Amino acid sequence: MAQVPVTILGIESSCDETAAAVVRLENGAASILSDIIWSQNAKHAPYGGIVPEIAARAHVEAADHAIKAAMDQAGVAFADLDAVAATAGPGLIGGVLVGLTAGKAIALAANKPFIAINHLEGHALSARLSRGCPYPFLLLLVSGGHCQLLAVEGLGHYKRYGATLDDAAGEAFDKAARVLGLGFPGGPALEKAAMGGDPKRYALPRPLLDRPTCDFSFAGLKSAVIRLAETEAPMDETAIRDAAASAQAAIADILADRTARAMDQFALAHEGEALRFVVAGGVAANQTIRTRLQNAAETRGFAMSAPPLRHCTDNAAMIALAGAERFLAGQRDDFSFAARPRWPLDEATAADS
Ligand code: KG4
Ligand code: ZN
């Protein structure tokens, strides 16, 4: 049966991007009518990392302008929307509150339903902004705040295979880049520095590789890179390139090994079905990591997809899409819905860990 199109405004402010987007979903196909992403990178760069208070203030200054820009670009009025969706967590609470409150206010003023979205669900569904990513699929979500492997069985049905026991992979990239003097944000800077570097020059730890789980650990690697930078100081350009390449290789090895293990588990649970693997989150922008994951997928008969870079990192189109899918599933949230600094996607599995 043909479905009536739904048009949703999505708002994202959980980290250091102020984003607003309008997405229309019709018969399972998403059209992105507008997609505003304003990064605060320049504001945080002098501190070498995200400062929550600065992030919250910057969201306050930018949110209404970003929302207006998204509505103007889409050419729709608030009255044309079916609902307003906003990230309600997890994330930096000051920032989450800004977007969440703006979303509720617009919904209230325009007399539209409000839908609270889990930021991680946004990432989980981001590959569905493009065609060709039906449920179920295995997801590696790998960003500055998160590192987890999930079976995405359907909207709201997530089974966690593994997660980081300490830091996220993006944090390891950011920390390594910082101690090697490569600037912020660290991931892209470290990837650039690693080009032409020798990934075997420095032996760095790859924790948990011998464990029969899909969990990750990056804290030991992070400390090892800090020690390396101290003991090798002062480092010349070649040493920095080699250290960057060695750190990137260690992170890629950890991600590829855990993902391969999760692929085997997913394949066992989905025998006879088409096997799909999606990688999302900021670290998915890394070419070395993409190639390693692609090899693991090919060996195991998985079709791999990754959202375009713009939708790998934080954006509001993914929040609007999650809002559209939830709207069609009948979800409506109360204006009393509170911001959540922590909000595991798979509440059932997370509760026992
Ligand atoms: O998804 P994202 O924009 O924000 C959240 O953490 O939710 O991810 C940002 C993270 C940062 O840690 C950044 O250094 C990392 O993704 N990143 C990269 C690359 N581009 C961004 N890491 C490695 N290589 C890259 N090219
Ligand atoms: Zn994110």
Image: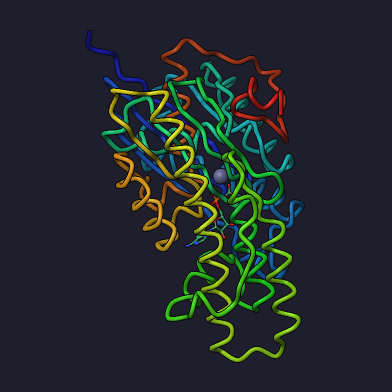
Point out residue 262 in the picture as x, y percentages from the top left corner: 48, 37
In depth, the one of 253 and 172 nearer the eye is 253
- Split into quadrants, the picture shows ligand 1 in the one at bottom right
Q: Is residue 184 visible?
A: yes
Q: Which residue is drawn at 41% across and 44% down?
A: 35
Q: Is residue 66 visible?
A: no
Q: In this view, does 15 lie above or below 333?
A: below
Q: Which residue lies furthest to the left in this view?
A: 2
Q: In this view, does 56 lie above or below 270?
A: below
Q: How many labels does the image show?
A: 0
In depth, the one of 269 and 123 nearer the eye is 269
- The quarter of the rendered structure image containing the N terminus is top left
In depth, the one of 70 and 122 nearer the eye is 122
Point out residue 235 in the picture as x, y percentages from the top left corner: 65, 88
Q: Which corner quadrant of the image does residue 6 belong to?
A: top left
> Is 249 displayed left or right of 146 in the figure?
left
Name the colouring of the figure.
rainbow
Point out residue 69 in the picture as x, y percentages from the top left corner: 45, 45
Q: Which residue is drawn at 51% across and 73% down?
A: 245
- The quarter of the rendered structure image containing the C terminus is top right
Point out residue 258 in the picture as x, y percentages from the top left corner: 52, 46
Q: Residue at x 41, y 29 (%)?
A: 77
Q: Is residue 157 above or below residue 54?
A: above
